[in-house]
Amino acid sequence: MKNYKTIVLSNHEISPDYFRMRILSPGFAAKAQPGQFVMVRTELMLPTMLRRPFGIFRVGCLPAECDGLPPREYMEILYKVVGQGTKILSELHQGDRVELLGPLGSGFDLGTPGKAKLLVGGGIGLVPLFMLGEALIKRGEKVRLLMGGRTRDDILAVTEFERSGVETYVSTDDGSLGENGLVTKVLERKLGKHPDAEVFACGPTPMLSAVANMCAAHNVSLQVSLEAHMACGVGACLGCVVKGVGHSDSNPHYLCTCKAGPVFNAADLDWGKAVVAGSDCAGGGCK
Amino acid sequence: MSSHKEKTMPVVRPSLAVEVAGLKLKNPVMPASGTFGYGEEYAPYFDLNRLGALVTKGLSLNPKAGNPTPRIAETTSGMLNAIGLQNVGIDAFVTAKVPVYRGLQTPVIANFFGNTLEEYGEVAKKLNDVPEVNAVELNISCPNVKQGGIVFGTDPSAAAQVVALVRKALSKPLIVKLTPNVTDITVIARAVEEAGADAISCINTITGMAIDVKTRQPKIANRTGGLSGPAIRPVAVRMVHQVVQAVKIPVIGIGGIMCAADALEFLIVGAKAVQVGTANFIDPQAMLTIIDGIEAFLVDEGLTDINQVIGSLKL
Ligand SMILES: Cc1cc2nc3c(=O)[nH]c(=O)nc-3n(C[C@H](O)[C@H](O)[C@H](O)COP(=O)(O)OP(=O)(O)OC[C@H]3O[C@@H](n4cnc5c(N)ncnc54)[C@H](O)[C@@H]3O)c2cc1C
Ligand SMILES: Cc1cc2nc3c(=O)[nH]c(=O)nc-3n(C[C@H](O)[C@H](O)[C@H](O)COP(=O)(O)O)c2cc1C
Ligand code: FES
């Protein structure tokens, strides 16, 4: 991990309110593990604004052949504009300065070779799944992505997953793209077909709770990537904790999302009242 | 020709060294408790030996789990936090964290707190026996659970009582950290000075509240939290100025320091050293930039020693 003082290579709106930013990051790719994240800060932000956490979508390198410049490593984030910080990010242009702290946190465990791998993404929650898919494919695994969103606008980068060799299944709450319904409906079906599957999920909490319930019922292992309000991203402020299994008011057990996570084994978390299987927005996209 | 001359000229770097309560610091910059973990969290980003001192997360007798989430919310030029003093407890600190400090070339200041007088005393006794801890910082911004939850640091006699008790239990330099949530901070400052404090650090966070207008709920689960960051700096500078006037012991200035100029404000009103908190979250190298910036300021001003700046306020 390192604080990169660098520049934006590109920043485009890929779907209404969703942006994709490519950031110059020499030496970053070799360190980044699937599921890790970065803390981003821009020069335009008031000097006092906290950094914002974003999952690492993918890493890559611009080859020298393309424009005669030396090869340049980059990393990409995919983000949804939800407030002031993401609004400022969305207004950045090529060459604008950004600071990138990372890669941070602990990412996905690739699981047992040979078992079917089901990736479940809700809306912007697909971000950490891309590098996971790549890593699993590289190991020769069969990888399926179940991608859910409220409408077609919330379905992102699916062709990119397909190009990397991941089989994709799209569902939307309004049926505007792919299957009509919640992503959990597709998961239920897939778990029926692949009882030995291992599941990896990222998305809104209600979706994750529903997925956790379902995986527990099918007795399959589940890793989830969580979000939490963060100040430091490195385990120093203790602002980002989630409840661990066995947590109670009298015997609290908190885990740092930025250090122990953002990826957790679902079995290590206390899902408590958050488990609301089949709730309205369990299909994802509701932020 | 001229560049050759520059290279061979003896470069006299100004001295940033200060002394606080018998602690010799290579520069006046240290982290504020609770914003730098136990130090190890930031070790990958820079050499901790560059710091004037290291200040730990607040420690208590027993491990403390802290508050429910969300615990933090950003506000204009600042942030609210209600972490709830989550920490590993003094015993785990001594076994798991202290060994890391053994090779360190900078003093370690252990920040601690209690919920009863007895707890404060117990932790002080334990810290006294840890050779790697060079000084302690006593956080008195905590409620006394045995006395209706009155905050030690808001009542002069309660503050004096806890300081006197810790003073007896401990032979190391004792820094007492004051809360700004009082009508007159000089009253508390004088009370803790009389009770035996070797130095005062101030300010801790200012109690605040922020509301999510859509949900009509407080933005942090604890309802209220401590405000930190640049938003509180003018209040902090004012209070440090007042405390410096009121007591003879050295004062460490804290509150919203983001850059060297901010730190210099505190030094000019008379703080012997400063602590940097929220800025670490925004830039993990903030303290290095501040140290270098203070040195550059001295060079610019033609000064040779930071002590020429400390207390140089013109009124
Ligand atoms: C590990 C991790 C990975 C993430 N990955 C992505 C990603 O790949 N793409 C993406 O679009 N978003 C991602 N998020 C969420 C993203 O951090 C927030 O949407 C963003 O911080 C909102 O900032 P804002 O200023 O626009 O919103 P505001 O609501 O104005 O933010 C106010 C404060 O709340 C915090 N905050 C608000 N919503 C969230 C949230 N959902 N999670 C954490 N903090 C929040 C902000 O950081 C800020 O401090 C991730 C969050 C975490 C913790
Ligand atoms: C997340 C967080 C945790 C803190 N924890 C402690 C603590 O454990 N003990 C303590 O004395 N002060 C604690 N503080 C207060 C800081 O040490 C400091 O006094 C305050 O934040 C003001 O400085 P700043 O504006 O530079 O952040 C904490 C502050 C923050 C933001
Ligand atoms: S964000 Fe500071 S501890 Fe996790």
Image (spheres, rainbow, N blue to C red):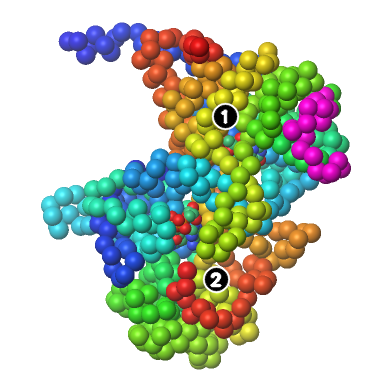
Label 1 residue SS: helix
Say above or below: A134 vs B273.
below
Is residue B223 rendered to the left or right of residue B300?
A: right
Q: Which residues are magenta?
A: B145-164
Q: Output the chain of dot 1.
A: B
Residue visible at 53% across and 81% down in the picture: A280
Whether callout 1 and callout 2 share a subunit is answered no
Residue visible at 28% across and 65% down in the picture: A13
Q: Is residue A181 magenta?
A: no
Query: Spatial distance from mark 1 to mark 2, Cα to Cα?
Result: 40 Å
Query: For the residue with label 1, is its CB less than 8 Å from the closest atom of ligand 2?
Result: yes
- Residue A205 circle label: 2
Pick the front one: B295 or A71: B295
Q: Output the chain of dot 2.
A: A
Coordinates of residue A22 in the picture (x, y in percent): 29, 57
- Residue B5 circle label: none
Coordinates of residue B314 in the picture (x, y in percent): 49, 11
- Residue B236 circle label: 1
Choose mark 1 or mark 2, whichever is in front: 1
Coordinates of residue B3 in the picture (x, y in percent): 21, 14
Q: Amino acid at mark 1?
A: Ala
Pick the front one: A209 or A91: A91
Q: Is residue B146 magenta?
A: yes
